[in-house]
Image (tube, rainbow, N blue to C red):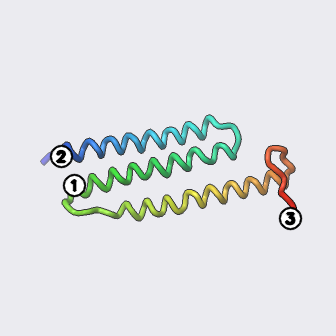
Amino acid sequence: MTGAVDLPIWAAVPVALLLLLGAALTLIGSIGLLRLRSFYERVHAPTLGSSLGVGCVLLASMLFFSVLQTRLVVHEVLIGLFVVATTPVTLMLLARAALYRDRQEGSDQVPRRQER
């Protein structure tokens, strides 16, 4: 027994494409993290890249294991829900903490708080 997986071609092609797309989106997010200048610009690229990239990888995983096990595999849905729920919250908390810090330091790069 070689342990090779016998995945039909109709499933192997979408799985491979989803994995490549997920890897490309994550790579684009990582490059955006390196290329953008300020913290406020940098924080967006990785969160979008990770959310979309992880989504494609999870879809590929669901398709792969559903075809191999001849039943619907939905464990990845929970992972996707956690990623979709935690990534924007983390982005918001980091941005608010940085904004608070920059305002306390009197940075000229952030707008002043408007009085009501």
Q: Mark 3 or mark 1, which has the lower sequence index?
A: 1
Residue 33 drawn at (x, y percent): 60, 41
What residue is shown at x 50% (from left), y 49% (from top)? 50
- Outermost residue, front side: 116
Number of numbered labels in the structure image: 3
Q: Nearer the viewer, residue 98 or 59?
A: 59
- Name above or below for residue 35 compared with residue 63: above
Residue 102 drawn at (x, y percent): 80, 51
Q: Callout 2, which amino acid?
A: Pro
Q: Callout 1, which amino acid?
A: Val
Q: Where does label 1 land, which residue?
A: 67
Viewer-nearest of labels 2 and 3? 3
Q: Is residue 56 left or right of residue 44?
A: left
Q: Residues within 10 Å of mark 1 (few under 14, many from 20)?
A: some
> Is the C terminus in the top left, top right, bottom left or bottom right quadrant?
bottom right
Q: Where does label 3 land, which residue?
A: 116
Q: Callout 3, which amino acid?
A: Arg
Q: Mark 1 or mark 2, which has the lower sequence index?
A: 2
Q: CA distance from mark 2 to mark 3?
A: 63 Å
Quadrant of the rendered image containing residue 96: bottom right
Quadrant of the rendered image containing residue 77: bottom left
Q: Are marks 1 and 2 in contact (CB under 8 Å)?
A: yes
What residue is shown at x 78% (from left), y 57% (from top)? 100
What residue is shown at x 48% (from left), y 63% (from top)? 82
